[in-house]
Amino acid sequence: MENIKEINIYYCDKCKTPILVEDQTKHCRCTMCNSQIRYTGTDARPVYPEERLMLEASIGEPLKYIKDDVWNLKGNKYLVNGEILKLQVRDIVSNNPEEVRNIINQYASKNTYKYFNKHIAKFIEANKYRLNIITDEACDFIEEKSKGYDIDSMFVSFSGGKDSTVVAHLVVKALCTTDVLHIFGDTTLELESTYEYVKGFKRENPNILMRAVKNKEKDFIDLTVNNFGPPSRVMRWCCTIFKTGPISRKIDALFKNKKEVLTFYGIRRSESINRSKYERDYESPKIIKQRVVGPIMDWKDIDVWLYLLSNDILINDAYRMGYSRVGCWCCPNNSSWSEYMSKIYEPHRYKEWRKILVEFAAKIGKPDPEDYISEGGWKARQGGNGLDVSKTKLSAEVCTTQENAKIYALKRPIEDQLYELFKPFGLIDKESGRRFINEVLVIDKRTSQPIISIEGNIGSNKLKVVILDKKNPKLLKKRVECQITKYQLCMECLACESLCKFDALKIKNGKYTIDEKKCSRCLECVAHFTGGCYIKKILYTKKQEE
């Protein structure tokens, strides 16, 4: 199946509307009036009346463009009737958000959709050929990839954003059923408009079963202030703890008896450099047993908007206001534009978050905390730099009386939980060891021979581990230390649980358990993260290893 052809944006000055063109020749013509059209850019999105008023308020000329055809070109340039405004994003976002908000409120009653609707009608008419191509191709792709899966083995990953909304609509259209489950991953950090949108989606689609998933045990602000510091572009720990982990757990619960689950995602290559490398059909690297397909992987923003507008689909109000994306409101990947939107439309939330960031900057010793935050320094922060990472280090000494033996000084006293983390290495034998030293043996399931000896009394902070396996004792020692580190650091982030494709590993109510009957000893939960534990990865610093 061939992917759809890439398009560029041209503009017809006579019809005053964008034309999506696949064949990039010098003499392209309008699909409505046959006039010659001119190249405008690679991608664009419509500017709704609410965003247009915000733009006008930002330049101090409310309602100036109320009758005009206004678009936002990729790179945050505004296009008015085909002409690019001589405005820099940095000039717009430097405005006083309170003053802009006051102007918006003052003129909101005079704002209208009358002219916007007329311009959009022309846009739809001029590009209906493109709409048919991308719709048919996406529906064919969904039908093809769904073969071999029953309706109870698939779901739509729903975020409340425009892309997942389009995919949800396409799946229903392609499969001719509303029975495909939709899972809304509530990170607890969504924009207020997203929560309202999900409610609206449910009202408009009462036959679609929507399940909301969130981490009810963890609080983002608490983890930021007391544990990890704010997430950064380098280490977005919030995604694992508040999205991947909870969704993985829900998949396990809902699709318990399924070997593989087909997931329809609204991911697109044009969104970022990283996503440009994604395959359209792949096995999820984060959630085991999940096969991900992207029906609109090769669509551009303007394709998405063409589909939404043509089908009169309900959208998240954040797009009307000017947000280009509607993910987490405090994401380190957010642009200065998204921050400007938050200052205008969610000022209380923004001020609270900034206060937390400034206090964190002061805590880690930044000389000018306010400047550090304003310049986005927190977004580039590396791991646990500036935080107390002593708890991530293992304190141990080599036992001089026994080969391949180490004595560890634990920060968390020995509990039965400790032995659960040794199950990936083999069977736990609490009966055959020397009882006077409280020895527990780990038995290799294949050879029935002991490969690890664990010595330590319940409640003690002293743990002795002896590697008995002679094949590769150094590697086994490293893996054992991964598990000891995990025992000391575990905060139920669910990263390990998400990795287990055999549904053997569960983390709940402070307990880390591994079902020996289900565990295949693949060691994925041990070796996946550097140091064995996602929390250690979050708090990693170079100095830590010196």
Image (cartoon, helix red, strand yellow):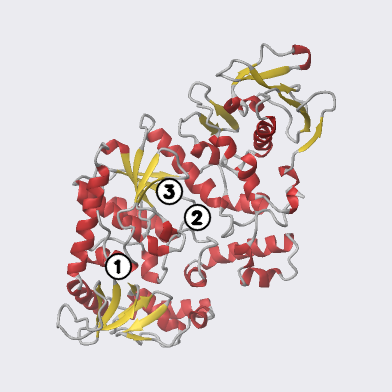
* Residue 330 location (% of width, % of height): 53, 61
Q: Residue furthest front?
A: 471
**Which numbered dot is residue 189?**
2
**Given this view, does label 1 or label 2 mark the residue nearer the observer?**
1
Mark 1 vs mark 2: which is more N-terminal?
Answer: 1
Q: Amino acid at mark 3?
A: Gly
Report, in whole angstroms, how far the alpha carbon at label 1 lies from the one at label 2: 34 Å
Q: Is residue 106 visible?
A: no
**Which numbered dot is residue 6?**
1
Q: Residues within 10 Å of mark 3 (few under 14, many from 20)?
A: many
Instruction: Place residue 192 in its image quadrant.
Output: bottom left
Residue located beneath label 3 in the image: 185
Q: Amino acid at mark 2?
A: Leu
Say which residue appears at 62% left-offset and 53% top-offset: 224
Report, in whole angstroms, how far the alpha carbon at label 2 lies from the one at label 3: 10 Å
* Residue 537 location (% of width, % of height): 63, 47
Report, in whole angstroms, how far the alpha carbon at label 1 lies from the one at label 3: 30 Å
**Given this view, does label 2 or label 3 mark the residue nearer the observer?**
3
Q: Nearer the viewer, residue 510 or 433?
A: 433
